[in-house]
Image (cartoon, rainbow, N blue to C red):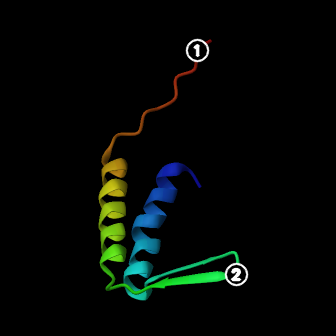
Amino acid sequence: MNQREQYSFILNIILPAIERDGLHIKAAGAELVLRPTDPSVEAFINEARRSLTYSLSRPVVNAVSYL
């Protein structure tokens, strides 16, 4: 998966799942559960959506090989 495909996957699959189910983070024997209505989750989703949409709207620059 290239970077644009990853961004698209996050934008169209991951963020809607977080909006629906909240955000569950497991690490080092601990778990953090943030509800979808939590203001920090809403802010995270909004900023991620804005950033990814901007990145995906930029034109793709083809690599130039110098021979």
Which quarter shows the N terminus? bottom right
In the shown orientation, is residue 4 left or right of residue 38? right
In the shown orientation, is residue 12 left or right of residue 25? left
| 66 lies above or below 26 | above
Q: Which residue lies under the disc numbered 2?
A: 29
- Which one is in front, 51 or 33? 33
User: Tag 2: residue type?
Assistant: Gly
In the shown orientation, is residue 15 left or right of residue 37? right
- Residue shown at the point (36%, 51%) measured from the top left: 56
SS under mark 1? loop
- Residue shown at the point (34%, 74%) measured from the top left: 40
Q: Say which of marks 1 and 2 sits in front.
A: 2
- Which one is in front, 20 or 60? 20
User: Tag 1: residue type?
Assistant: Tyr
Image location of residue 42, percent across then percent down: 31, 75
Residue 11 falls in image quadrant: bottom left
Which quarter shows the C terminus? top right
SS under mark 2? loop
| 8 lies above or below 42 | above
Q: Earlier in the sequence, mark 1 or mark 2?
A: 2
In the shown orientation, is residue 37 left or right of residue 7? left
User: Cβ–Cβ below 8 Å for labels 1 and 2?
Assistant: no
- Which one is in front, 33 or 50? 33
- Residue shown at the point (37%, 56%) measured from the top left: 52
Image location of residue 37, percent across then percent down: 31, 86
Image location of residue 28, percent across then percent down: 70, 75
Q: Work out how far the residue at label 1 is from the one at label 2, CA to CA, in angstroms.
A: 50 Å
Q: Is the residue marked by circle 2 packed among few (<14), some (14-19), or many (20+) residues within 10 Å?
A: few
- Residue shown at the point (29%, 58%) measured from the top left: 50
Q: Which residue lies under the disc numbered 1?
A: 66
